[in-house]
Image (tube, grey):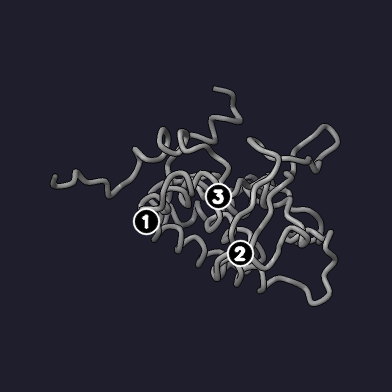
């Protein structure tokens, strides 16, 4: 399986409690609290990271988030690409949870072409930087390892094992299935076919029980 696809189906979701602990830890972080809206949107929409950081305010309506582009890494750095991995675009119905996230960061007089999520310096979020600093951690110039948020939570025993940010997507899909939402609807929200949902996610339902027939 190509590397890009392996991340798509290496499914090891966080529990709901782990998800909430990660969000809380970002909220309480002096260094990385500005990433809270991004982390929340990843957990609460199941979108791919490349789709989240490509969102502009023109993609938000009263009822929907329209995903139709992605940020990719090119030889010249970060690049904006039209279309998504498996489709040209998809619409995600906004609920109160997502609306609250977006309203909390929307400027009063925002430009429709402005990106929703910004780096600390105001530019497009470099997801590699987010992963290797805020999420996982890094070695400083002295060779000392500085733990990121999730690595800290693993060491504290709050999160059972380290997992990459892509698992936010898998967490959303898994929790939807555990809430008995039809795989066709979940697939429509996240840009996967029902067959993919059944094949890769339905078997991972933690509370799956044999019914009394």
Secondary structure of residue under mark 3: helix
> Which x, y percent locates residue 191?
58, 42
Q: Which residue lies furthest to the bottom in this view?
A: 108
Q: Distance between the residues labelled 2 and 3?
A: 22 Å
Say which residue appears at 78% left-offset and 58% top-offset: 115
> Which x, y percent locates residue 117?
72, 59
Which quadrant of the rendered structure holds the N terminus?
top right
Contact? badges 2 and 1 (CB < 8 Å):
no
Q: Residue 112 carries which label?
A: none
Q: Quadrant of residue 66?
A: bottom right
Q: Sequence order check: which comes first, mark 2 or mark 1? A: 2
Q: In this view, does 208 lie to the left or right of 147?
A: left
Estimate how packed mark 2 is, as few (under 14), some (14 to 19) or many (20 or more) residues with alpha carbons within 10 Å.
some
> Which x, y percent locates residue 203?
34, 38
Which quadrant of the rendered structure holds the C terminus?
top left
Say which residue appears at 53% left-offset and 30% top-offset: 6
Secondary structure of residue under mark 1: loop
- Residue under numbered circle 1: 179
Vertical relation: 98 (above or below) 154: below
Total label count? 3
Secondary structure of residue under mark 2: helix
- Residue under numbered circle 2: 36
Q: Distance between the residues labelled 3 and 1?
A: 15 Å
């Amino acid at each position: 399986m190509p590397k890009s696809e392996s991340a798509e189906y290496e499914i090891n979701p966080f529990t709901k409690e782990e998800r909430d602990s990660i969000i809380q830890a970002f909220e309480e972080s002096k260094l990385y609290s500005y990433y809270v809206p991004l982390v929340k949107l990843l957990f609460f929409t199941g979108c791919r990271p490349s789709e989240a950081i490509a969102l502009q305010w023109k993609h938000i309506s009263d009822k929907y988030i329209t995903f139709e582009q992605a940020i990719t890494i090119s030889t010249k750095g970060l690049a904006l690409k039209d279309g998504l991995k498996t489709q040209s675009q998809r619409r995600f119905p906004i609920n109160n949870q997502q609306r609250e996230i977006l309203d909390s960061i929307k400027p009063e007089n925002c430009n429709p072409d402005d990106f929703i999520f910004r780096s600390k310096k105001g530019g497009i979020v470099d997801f590699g930087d987010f992963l290797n600093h805020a999420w996982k951690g890094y070695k400083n110039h002295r060779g000392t390892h500085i733990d990121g948020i999730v690595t800290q939570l693993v060491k504290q025993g709050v999160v059972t094992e380290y997992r990459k940010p892509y698992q936010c997507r898998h967490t959303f899909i898994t929790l939807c299935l555990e809430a008995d939402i039809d795989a066709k609807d979940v697939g429509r929200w996240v840009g996967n076919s029902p067959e993919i949902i059944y094949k890769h996610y339905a078997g991972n339902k933690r509370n799956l029980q044999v019914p009394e027939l």
